[in-house]
Amino acid sequence: MQKLAIGCLYFLSLTAWAEPISRVDRDLGEQRCDVVVVRPDPAHPIGNTEDRRLFIEADNSELERESEQSHYIGNVELHYKRTYLEADRIDHLSQQNRINATGNVYISKPGFRATSDHLQMDTQSEQAQLDQAEYRLLKKYARGHAEKIRIIDDNYSVYDQISYTTCKPGSDAWLIEADELQIDENIGLGRAYHATFYVQNLPVLYTPYISFPIDDRRMSGFLSPTIGGSDATGSDNSLSYYLNLAPNYDLILTPRHMEKRGLMLGSEFRYLSRYRHRGSIKSEYIYDDQGRESDEPIERYALSYRNHWQLSSNWDNNLFYDGISDKTYLDDFENSLFARSTRYLERRADLNYRGAYGNLLVRAQSYQTIDRSIASSSSPYTRLPQLLWTTDQHDRSLGLHYELTAELTHFQHDERIQGQRLILKPSVSLPLRRSYGHLTPKLSINYNDYLLEQLSSDQDRSPSLILPTASLDSGLVFEREIGWFGSKTTQTLEPRLFYLYTPYEEQDETPNFDSAELGFSFANLFRDNRFSGNDRIGDANQLTTALTSRILDAKSGRELLRGSIGQTHYFRDRKVQLSGTVDELRSSSIAAELSASLGAGWRTSLNLQWDPHAEKKELIQNKARLYYRGGNNKLINLSYSYNRDTISTGLGAEDVDLSFHWPLHPHFKIMGGWDYSLYHEESFERFAGFEYGGGCCWVVRTLYREYLQDIESERSSSFMIQIELRGLGMVGNPMLTFLKDNISGFIVPEAQ
């Protein structure tokens, strides 16, 4: 497999670039893969289709009055409608409405130009015939040679004994030779008859008929193949076929052969209706997985369904379904529909209403647990259904702000308590905002009511809970003008106080369907509940103090630097806990954030959690990040993370992550990633690759990857190589999708 990859790279590296030297390439400006920009030339403008006058300039001319023939000799230039013509000699036969041009003939029309030994043109229809011609199709920068070209009109032409490629002059990395080629720009299609496909001058395919796109319109055809392999699959090769079934739906079929597992068929069906209805269905299916020993065929599959329907301006519907045949599917099949790190696959149906007075969500939701380390009793609950109403009314009478959350959900689980839950949370606040600060008092009521099933005999079937929450959020903003590396900037100093009070009520009798303890962060210091979900309402009598300072550009207001630090002070113990252990500390950890713009696309951030109660006043969490964002997908991501609480397990305790994508040259790009555990002194994942391409001609991408399923497993590896022949069509790209998922900020180019 590696020899094959090296051979492919060497094969394509033989391409040599040459500067355009032919007359047919004169006046061409920037070449892109979708169009060639033609520099305006006042010497021979395009002309006017309504102007039927014929303009000819030459060194010498002769006129035959009886036959009404004109002969122009030496540096002849002709302008007629939108046609420009050069030749050593032009004969104008006015009675026959014909022009004959010989010797160094050059013709230019919108989107087309060619050189030829001889040309005939009808001046009425502008139809023309060229012999022994070298041509350029400028809309896609296709080029080649033809023994005869017949120009029927501005959008349709026929070529005999033709060569066709989109590579630059001097490079024939790929080439089609055919007895006849028809170019129909009305439908964006080229049709070749008795065609032979060449790669680096070697014939690789003959077909009596082939069609291919000549612009960006979709059409059926083969896509770029992917060649590779991994420890799990062995040699792994796939070739997709794109079916343009209709203007509003299409299908991609991807046969995939894996040496160790057999033949898999992948598909992706996409649709779009005029009723604002769109979606996709992706699937993978293998009838008999040869990697598993069994007397009977072992069928395995993956399915992903997405659907969005905009029913009206207020109503819409979303459907999501992800599923696999078994929990080891993602480990066994690289490049599957889902990320290998996925723990749950979601199935969800949503009906949404958005109105002036509130929003309604009707949801049915379930999960498939695919992480083998998660017991079935710990899997998430199924919601069948969930009804959620939220409203947020601003600036009502006296400046009051009203909010309401109302939810009714039925939770199902095979191994745990299940039942219904009603949530009501009305709140009212009075935001007082000024340029120098803010003051916002707020009062909320939390009401939970349950109707439970699968209980023991001593449990309450219908527990309920009602608790008020009061908060007061206040802050001031001080500003001053300062200099910042020679620029005028504004520095702010923003102290903030947030007081929160919720009385204690014992909640051990109520179930926990969806609550978890929030992670500690600067932003979470200002939440009115230390738990996510709705089953646990944390008791609180606390004051958060924080300070933020920013440096802003005086002209644009852009934030150059921001630093924040905060801590919560407790006036009583926190008795409501998921673990049952009362928290008796008088203050929280200290949270700090720092974010800075370093200029020229560079930015850095730092998040700290410091424990003042520990004997050594140690850090609990620390995450530092440095990243760069530039044009043409220039990306660098570097981060360091530390979490004291996971030292016991070693999972994510102390990691360094690096990823990048960098063009070294317009035709050469490198990319890579590295996830290294300092705690284990082991790389969990690393990948590296490059992209090398000849502009609009071809591009080859390679990627090598090593990874660990977990710290106790053996290292696995995979390799992919993909060769894309530009100008023959491309829809979708698994390698670019991998880069998007693993390099933060990577954007899949639209041209792909």
Image (tube, helix red, strand yellow):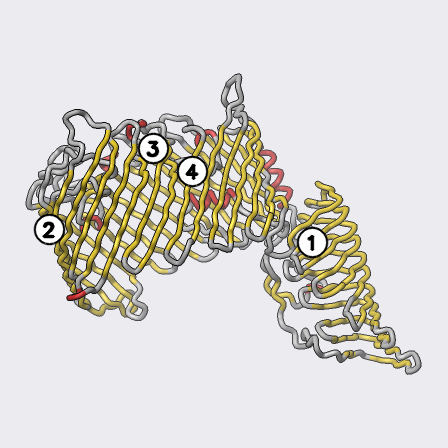
81 w.r.t. 23: above or below? below
Q: CA distance from mark 1 to mark 2?
A: 72 Å
| Circle 2 SS class | strand
Disc 4 marks a residue whose amino acid type is: Asp
Residue count near mark 1 (Cα–Cα under 10 Å), binned few <14, some 14–19, many ≥20: some
> Residue 547, how many percent across, how many down?
17, 56
| Circle 4 SS class | strand
The answer to whether residue 475 shows anywhere in this view is no
Residue hosting label 4: 322
Residue hosting label 1: 190
Question: Which part of the image, by quadrant, shows the N terminus?
Answer: top right
Q: Which one is earlier in the sequence, the residue at label 1 or at label 4?
A: 1
Residue hosting label 3: 681
The answer to whether residue 412 shows anywhere in this view is yes
599 w.r.t. 258: above or below? below
Disc 1 marks a residue whose amino acid type is: Gly
Q: Between tags 2 and 3, which lies in front?
A: 2
> Residue 494, how many percent across, how many down?
17, 61
Disc 3 marks a residue whose amino acid type is: Glu
| Circle 3 SS class | loop
